[in-house]
Image (spheres, rainbow, N blue to C red):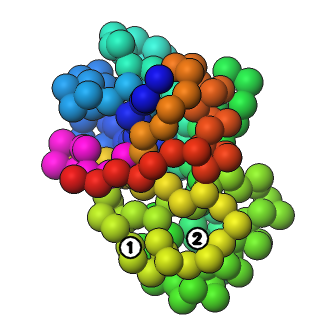
Amino acid sequence: MLLKGALHVHTTCSDGKLSPQQVADAYSSLGFDFIAFTDHDYLLKPFYRDMYAEVKTELLLFTGVELTVFLKGYVHVNRIEGDREVLHIFNHVGEYDFTPAQVLERLGELRRMYPIDAVEITSKGFREPLLEELEMPYPKIASDDSHASVNIGRAWIELDTARDKDSIIRAVKRGEFWNCYI
């Protein structure tokens, strides 16, 4: 089954401009099949999981968190929960102004802290050609990192797998998806 999804989505549970319900409605209206709520760890509101659970939608909803990792400055890593599987994505690498060598160095350091499964090669949904070309031992993933309605639907992944959280996570870990852009 061909599925369309976004694995980096923010809501009013941290610094997003839309409620979880508004975010789900917006992605649903664009034909998405799944999204991952990945609000910032240090800004999470109390009871954020309850707010996610109240969302009424046909979308498959992942719960996650965007972790702030201090590593010669800071970087962000999404931790996305399936039913049994967990996915870790090194986020918006192009926004850190790293050289290619620094990207690979940070990946090596992060791997000692988290089981990194993929690297986000977009910045707010826009392509980062240098990252698309950089050789690295991880699947490269597109995401729109939405914080407001203007960001929704700029970049996403599509994959052919069963419509369940763990199947999606396993497909991403294997790199069995396509990056898509408007």
The residue under the point 67% across, 46% down is 174
Q: CA distance from mark 2 to mark 1?
A: 20 Å
The residue under the point 29% across, 54% down is 181
Task: Please give the range of residues in magenta.
Answer: 149-156
Mark 1 residue element: loop
Q: Is residue 93 visible?
A: yes
Q: Quadrant of residue 139?
A: bottom right
Q: Nearer the viewer, residue 37 or 165?
A: 165
Q: Is residue 75 magenta?
A: no
Q: Is residue 155 magenta?
A: yes
Q: From the viewer's perspective, is 127 left or right of 17?
A: right
For disc 1, the neighbor class at 10 Å (few under 14, some 14 to 19, many from 20) is some
Residue 101, image x, y percentages: 64, 88
**Amino acid at circle 2:** Tyr
The residue under the point 38% across, 25% down is 33
Residue 81, image x, y percentages: 63, 31
The numbered disc on residue 33 is: none
Mark 2 residue element: strand
Image height check: is 37 above or below 28? below
**Amino acid at circle 1:** Glu
Q: Mark 1 — residue?
A: 128
The residue under the point 33% across, 13% down is 57
Residue 178, image x, y percentages: 45, 49
Q: Mark 2 — residue?
A: 74
